[in-house]
Image (tube, grey):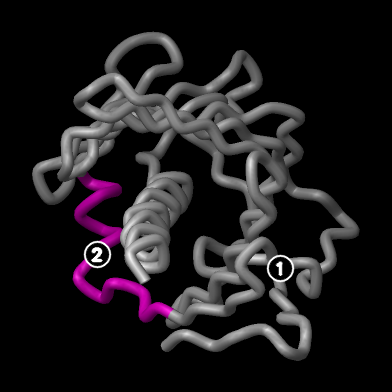
Amino acid sequence: MLNFQKNLTLWSLLMKYILATLLLIGSLEAGVVLPSNFSSSFTQTITTEKGKVIRYGGSVAFKDQRLFKWNYTSPTKKEVCTNGVEILVIDHDLEQVSNYMVDDGVNLEKIMSKAKLIKGNEYKAVYKNNAYMITLDGSAKLQKVSYKDSLDNKVSIIFSNVAYDQPNFNQNTLKCNAPKGYDRVK
């Protein structure tokens, strides 16, 4: 039971990281051209106050700031999807499906109004006492998002193989389909 609670707490934190990151992707100030869709590989590193490092890897895709899917392939296999109202997490290692409601306290307009160009391709946004650093590559595509969460963990997400505005983007790839027989946690 303790391991289940630990996993649930870790996933709750991970969901906050994911949601905050995608909200930032969709809310950078004018001057940054936002895509109508986006896909990328990613490496996410979380460093605790005590120096413990947790690394995740996989791919992410999103459309219109509300629809997204993160496919975690390393070190565990998980899928995280949202329709803008609900987040669905499929943990293939635990054979478990969890549902979370999107935090309706997040205000995209406020985040957008606070994102400021620092220098070159670096932006900073402060929202709900969290500072987010956003780095774009030379083509003005998302390269990195880093921030310190409410538990003082340092979070860094590095994006690679970034593709914006794909003409044949299939919105169905953003859906999570839970295999039959997985446990449901609500």
Residue 130 sits above or below residue 168 on the image: above
Q: Position of residue 47 (x, y in %)?
A: 34, 27
Q: Position of residue 64 (x, y in %)?
A: 58, 64
Find residue 91 and report its image quarter.
bottom right
What is the quadrant of the N terminus in the image?
Answer: bottom left
Q: Is residue 107 magenta?
A: yes
Query: How many neighbours does mark 2 have within 10 angstroms: few (below 14), some (14-19), or many (20 or more)?
Result: some
Q: Which residues are magenta?
A: 100-113
- The residue lying toward the viewer, choosing from 89 and 32, is 89
* Amino acid carrying mark 1 in the image: Leu
Residue 49 is at least partly visible in this image: yes
Whether residue 19 sits left or right of residue 83 in the image: it is: left
The circle drawn on residue 174 is 1
Q: Residue at x 59, y 69 (%)?
A: 81
* Amino acid carrying mark 2 in the image: Val
- The residue lying toward the viewer, choosing from 82 and 119, is 82
Q: Element type at marker 2?
A: loop
Q: Position of residue 4 (x, y in %)?
A: 41, 67
Find residue 83 and report its image quarter.
bottom right
Q: Residue at x 26, y 58 (%)?
A: 109
Q: Element type at marker 1?
A: helix
Q: Residue at x 27, y 36 (%)?
A: 115
Mark 2 sits on what residue?
A: 106
Q: Is residue 183 magenta?
A: no
Q: Earlier in the sequence, mark 2 or mark 1?
A: 2
